[in-house]
């Protein structure tokens, strides 16, 4: 298999971009990636574009988005396709792009993920994501992703004795990182007193899907992110001299039952575990080798459950890591240095690409002051589709 | 023509499906038996149709939540959802009819309108405290 490097990265701010057009925000992030790779004039060396988007058809009444994007950044006749895997569309598009290069089919690929969700009401946005649930056995009941997040959180807290206070500590940590990330949707820190324990905390931090509160959930965001990948053995690597290439050293994904009730142990995130095992095997690494991670946390409880499932520590042991500050930016294994979905935001199609944007930035040593991990070697990202029924893990490494 | 109408229950009943080869029950309807790989044919024309078995009775609550973010048209402050396990081992998600559930408690299955669509009501599981 050929080695694949990340040679360009681009991002838009995440937040309310509803006054813009979906393909405009996606092509803006793509142009940022062209500039980062220093190939704006030589952009036609890109042979293939994979676009990640979940809701263009439903939310924005737009289809053929990949073709539209290619045209808007004048990249014809590059090949272009859309990859849809729910909230894991971004990482799936990276996986497909990686495979296209690794197989020898092409040398240079652009991956752009984006979503424009704030054009509809909050409920319509939630309902749109819920269309990925089983139509008869889940969606029909007005069940939503937050509802499954709430049930998962309660089962986890009851089994492992995790306290609300510990969940709030994770939110504070994520907001601390997000406040220093110029692309984050929410760039204000929050305090423990503000969201837990004080008189007003339960008003500010109201219940959404009991026991999950507002600060246990990600905002609804618009935004886009983009990557340029190149085969390391390609002569076209000569175009990418300006930035240090970062390797995609491992990719793995797996699926799990569509209905959550079909899982023998609903707290076991099998698709996370199996995808991560494949990624570690491809990279020749173990969880101990990972310097930092971006873990898909639309509900903060998932940051904890995923960190256990990818083997950072045992099941139910996250609270010990929280108590010791292990996952903070200056800890032994910083998690969600970007602020995570919690603070950075979650434009569903963009999220997986944005996670790898963050891994690249950290590995290059380009993260903003106060949120740069100290000399990282390997970063791991988990992009969680469905309620864990299609999950992609990506490991990026410094050469 | 394949009839997929069971994906939208219109009668106040919810069914599990029984594999004609090995008797394994599943909910919702699969297209291939998990246990013996026998195929289900919703039309019953190419492969034998699977027997519909009413799903309900007593069950145990495995996990639950109260959801406060609701679509327009609900007067309730929140809806309560849960995942239960029936006596036959099958599990399902559904609505809970009590305000203060407890994980592990025994519940009784009812069928009610779980979603109102324009022109059609959708029936599904509602779990309540068992009658004394
Ligand atoms: Zn069978």
Image (tube, rainbow, N blue to C red):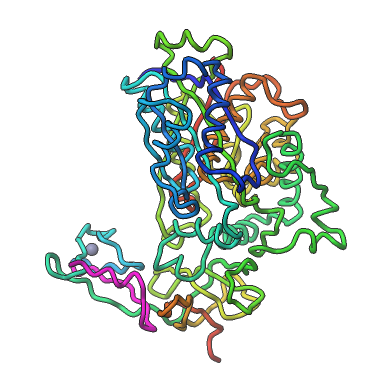
Q: Quadrant of residue A44?
A: top left
- Indicate yes or no whether the magenta region holds residue A304: no
Residue A297 screen position, x and y as percent: 61, 46
- At 43% across and 28% down in the image, what residue appears? A281
Side of A130 relative to A234 (left or right): right
* Image quarter of the N terminus of chain B: bottom left
Q: Which residues are magenta?
A: B1-20
- Residue B84, percent from left and from top: 49, 71
Q: Residue at x 45, y 75 (%)?
A: B117
- The residue depicted at 67 percent of the width and 21 percent of the height is A366
Ligand 1, seen in the image, is in the quarter at bottom left
Residue B9 at x, y = what percent?
36, 76
Residue situated furthest left in the rendering: B46
In the displayed structure, would residue A176 be above or below residue A157? above
When the figure is inspected, residue B17 is found, relative to residue A56, above or below; the finding is below
From where the camera sits, is residue B68 visible?
yes
Give residue A69's position: percent from left, percent from top: 45, 35
Q: Quadrant of the C terminus of chain B?
A: bottom right
From this view, report whether residue A274 is shown above or below residue A1: below
Residue A49 falls in image quadrant: top left
Q: Residue at x 83, y 58 (%)?
A: A197
Q: Nearer the viewer, residue A145 or B25?
A: A145
Overall secondary structure of the magenta section: loop
Whether residue B123 is visible here, answered yes or no, is: no
Closest to the observer, A284 or A78 = A78
């Amino acid at each position: 298999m050929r080695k694949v490097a990340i040679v360009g990265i681009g991002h838009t701010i995440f937040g309310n971009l509803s006054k813009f057009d979906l393909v405009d925000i996606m092509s803006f992030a793509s142009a940022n990636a062209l500039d980062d790779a220093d190939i704006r004039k030589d952009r036609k060396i890109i042979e293939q574009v994979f676009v990640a988007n979940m809701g263009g058809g439903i939310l924005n009444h737009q289809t053929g988005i990949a073709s539209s994007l290619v045209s808007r950044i004048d990249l014809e006749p590059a090949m272009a396709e859309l990859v849809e895997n729910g909230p894991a569309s971004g990482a799936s598009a990276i996986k497909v792009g990686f495979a296209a290069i690794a197989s020898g089919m092409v040398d240079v690929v652009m991956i752009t993920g984006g979503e424009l969700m704030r054009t509809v009401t909050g409920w319509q946005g939630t309902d749109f994501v819920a269309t990925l649930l089983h139509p008869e056995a889940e969606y029909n009941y007005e069940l939503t992703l937050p509802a499954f997040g709430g049930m998962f959180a309660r089962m986890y807290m009851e089994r492992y004795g995790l306290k609300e206070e510990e969940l709030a500590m994770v939110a504070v940590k994520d907001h601390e990182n997000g406040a220093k990330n110029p692309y984050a949707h929410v760039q204000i820190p929050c305090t423990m007193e503000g969201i837990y324990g004080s008189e007003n905390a339960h008003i500010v931090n109201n219940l959404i899907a009991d026991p999950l509160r507002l600060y246990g959930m990600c905002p609804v965001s618009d935004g886009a992110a983009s990557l340029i990948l190149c085969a390391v053995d390609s002569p076209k690597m000569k175009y990418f001299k300006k930035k240090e290439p970062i390797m995609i050293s491992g990719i793995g994904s797996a699926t799990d039952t569509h209905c959550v009730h079909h899982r023998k142990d609903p707290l076991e995130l099998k698709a996370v575990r199996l995808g991560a095992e494949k990624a570690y095997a491809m990279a020749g690494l173990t969880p101990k080798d990972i310097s930092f991670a971006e873990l898909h946390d639309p509900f903060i409880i998932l940051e904890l459950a995923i960190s256990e499932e990818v083997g950072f520590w045992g099941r139910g042991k996250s609270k010990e890591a929280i108590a010791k500050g292990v996952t903070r930016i200056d800890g032994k294994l910083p998690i969600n240095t970007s602020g995570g979905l919690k603070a950075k935001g979650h434009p569903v199609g963009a999220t997986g690409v944005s996670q790898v944007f963050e891994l690249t930035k950290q590995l290059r040593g380009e993260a903003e002051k106060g949120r740069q991990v100290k000399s990282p070697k390997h970063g791991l990202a988990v992009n969680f589709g469905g309620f864990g029924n299609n999950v992609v893990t990506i490991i990026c490494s410094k050469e | 023509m394949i009839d997929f109408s069971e994906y939208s229950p219109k009668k106040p009943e919810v069914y599990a499906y029984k594999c004609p080869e090995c008797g394994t029950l599943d909910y919702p309807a699969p297209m291939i038996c998990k246990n013996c790989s026998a195929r289900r044919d919703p039309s019953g024309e190419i492969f034998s149709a699977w027997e519909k078995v009413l799903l309900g009775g007593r069950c145990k609550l495995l996990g639950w939540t109260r959801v406060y973010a609701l679509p327009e048209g609900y007067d309730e402050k929140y809806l309560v959802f849960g995942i239960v396990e029936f006596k036959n081992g099958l599990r399902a998600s559904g609505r809970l009819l009590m305000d203060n559930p407890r994980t592990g408690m025994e519940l009784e299955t009812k069928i009610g309108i779980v979603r109102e669509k324009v022109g059609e009501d959708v029936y599904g599981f509602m779990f309540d405290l068992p009658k004394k």
